[in-house]
Image: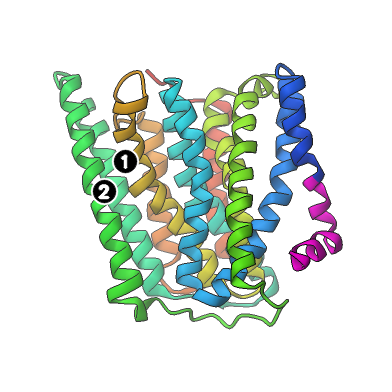
Amino acid sequence: MKLLLDEIRHNPLLWLLAFVPVVFVAAKLEPESHTLLFLLSVLAIVPLATLLSHATESVAAKTGDAAGGLLNATLGNLTELVIALAALKAGQYMLVKASIAGAIVTNALFMLGASFFLGGLKHHVQEFNRVSARFQAGLLFLAAIALLIPSAVATADSAAAVEFTQSLSVGLAVLLIVAYGLGMLFSLKTHRELFASTGHAEEGEAPWPLRLALGTLAGVTVLVALVSEIFVESVQKAAEGFGMTQAFVGFIVVALVGGAAEMASAFSAARKDRLDLSVGIALGSASQIALFVAPVLVLLSYVIGPAPMTLQFWPGAMVMVFVATLTAALVTNSGRSAWFVGVLVLMVYLIFAMTLYLLPPRVG
């Protein structure tokens, strides 16, 4: 605990932790002040993301970058899952699907591209495990196909019944969860030697003890999830004041804030020449959302939702997910990166963001 307090005392960014209790108090006293709650929740998530970053790096130092990246992606996606469950229970399926597609695109493009860019500014050329990157990109490509099929069938055959789409979505959800489980068995058990780190990490601060790091990960993840709920409740109204559309909010804003903790870890690791950890977090998080979070939400919609949810997305979302998957696979194929590679990936993401801001998709 002394190490944690020392870290907070010497890092001015962590002084923003004072906004964590403030946002909870404000949510109780002024629940209708949406713009204020939106700003306070963002200020609260930033220091929590910084703490999560340090704790994740400490765990990765003990377990290796492959397991560390998986752990960070899992805990980071817990935030998205909590947000989506709240929207699912309320029957806001458009927000659920927008946050799912937005999280996949944001992780595969923005987080990956920014990691390449920030790491490349400090290091001339960086290397990472090409096998691991190809594996994650392959999982993501599988998920993209599974998400594309219900939309393609429904578009091509207008006579397809709602029951067919629902049954197909349930079947695909089960297949994706099985594929994700087998993928974890392959990467962490039977062929774990293929996923060893290739980067040359810089010497930095001594990692925290494993017990402190795991305790911090668990506690901070819960706080991030609670603050994110306040953020989601306020963001729709606050967005109107800032001139943002619903599509832009669900696809871009919610995804960026929900993934802030993972991004802090990925960016910090890239600057320290631990690009394996950065790529593992970015692509691992994207594939986990597509292969696990989305299918789980489909199955849970039969239990907590007002009606079953399907894996049928609007065409614009599927195009962006598919292009993001292909882009991630292309830029990670060589196992090397430089800052301009990050620029190219970020440009694809900015094209999507600009499109959604100016011309939001129509959702039926």
Q: Is residue 301 above or below residue 272?
A: above
Bin the neighbour count of mark 2 within 10 Å (Cα to Cα): few under 14, some 14-19, many 20 and up: many
What span is in magenta?
A: 1-17
* Colour scheme employed for the rendering of this structure: rainbow
| Residue 2 point in image, percent of width and height | 78, 66
Asked if marks 1 and 2 touch (Cβ < 8 Å), the reply is yes
Element marked by disc 1: helix
Q: Is residue 277 left or right of residue 177?
A: right
Mark sitting on residue 295: 1
In this rendering, is residue 215 above or below 47?
below
Picture residue at 59% right of the left edge, 57% below the top: 217
In this view, 164 is above or below 47: above
The location of residue 310, given as percent across then percent down, is 29, 29
Instruction: State which tag comes first along the sequence, 1 or 2.
Output: 2
Q: Secondary structure at mark 2?
A: helix
Q: Is residue 344 visible?
A: no
